[in-house]
Image: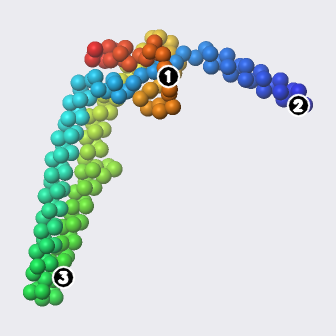
Amino acid sequence: MKKLFIIVCAAMLACGMTFAKDQSIAYVDMTYILKNLPQYEQANEQLTLLSRRWQKEIDAAAQEARVMASNYQTEQIFLSDAMRRQREEEIVKKEQDVLELKRKYFGQEGELYKKREALIKPIQDEIYNAIQELADLKRIDIVKDRSADPALLYMSSKLDISDQVLQKLGAK
């Protein structure tokens, strides 16, 4: 029984090695590709400008809340209990508004996320389609992103198809 098990394992290992040798692998460097696409740089610049504008809006609202709190601290002893409660509620409301603005613009489903999806996803889809077309044309079975693989220590430059992808996209 042990001999049969060893023979089956050896046969599976031999078949696996043969299968691995028959596969064609190529690499792309997505960081390099994106850096060389003008439309990606333009989209990134748009996102940066939007992000800065929204951050300024949030900072202004936060500053307003800080001023309200500071004024309250100074005037607190002169206020009636009802006025204190009202001012405290106003300050808390303003701070909640600031948090809501942050969530609206920079949250998981916020405006920045939606804008990034609208601007970057079509570019990524274009790159993916170009890679797929090249892989089909050159009969490549596996295409890996070398910029996303920290375990990759060495790769022959002849396996890198990044420039070919850029050519297909009309960037180089």
Residue 76 in the image: x percent, y percent? 13, 83
Q: CA distance from mark 3 to mark 2?
A: 82 Å
Q: Compared to 112, does 93 lie above or below? A: below
Residue 153: image location, x then y, percent: 50, 26
> Left or right: 60 with respect to 101?
left
Question: Circle 1 sits on which residue?
Answer: 154
Q: Give the numbered dot on residue 2.
A: 2
* Marks 2 and 1, how far apart at CA: 40 Å
- Closer to the camera: disc 3 or disc 1? 1
Q: Residue furthest bottom?
A: 80
Q: Which residue is mark 3?
A: 85
The quadrant where residue 114 appears: top left
Give the position of the C terminus as an image quadrant: top left
User: Picture quarter containing residue 68?
Assistant: bottom left
Q: Amino acid at mark 1?
A: Tyr
Residue lying at 17% horizontally and 41% vertically, measured from the top left: 49
Please state which of the two labelled residues, at mark 2 or mark 1, is closer to the viewer.
Answer: 1
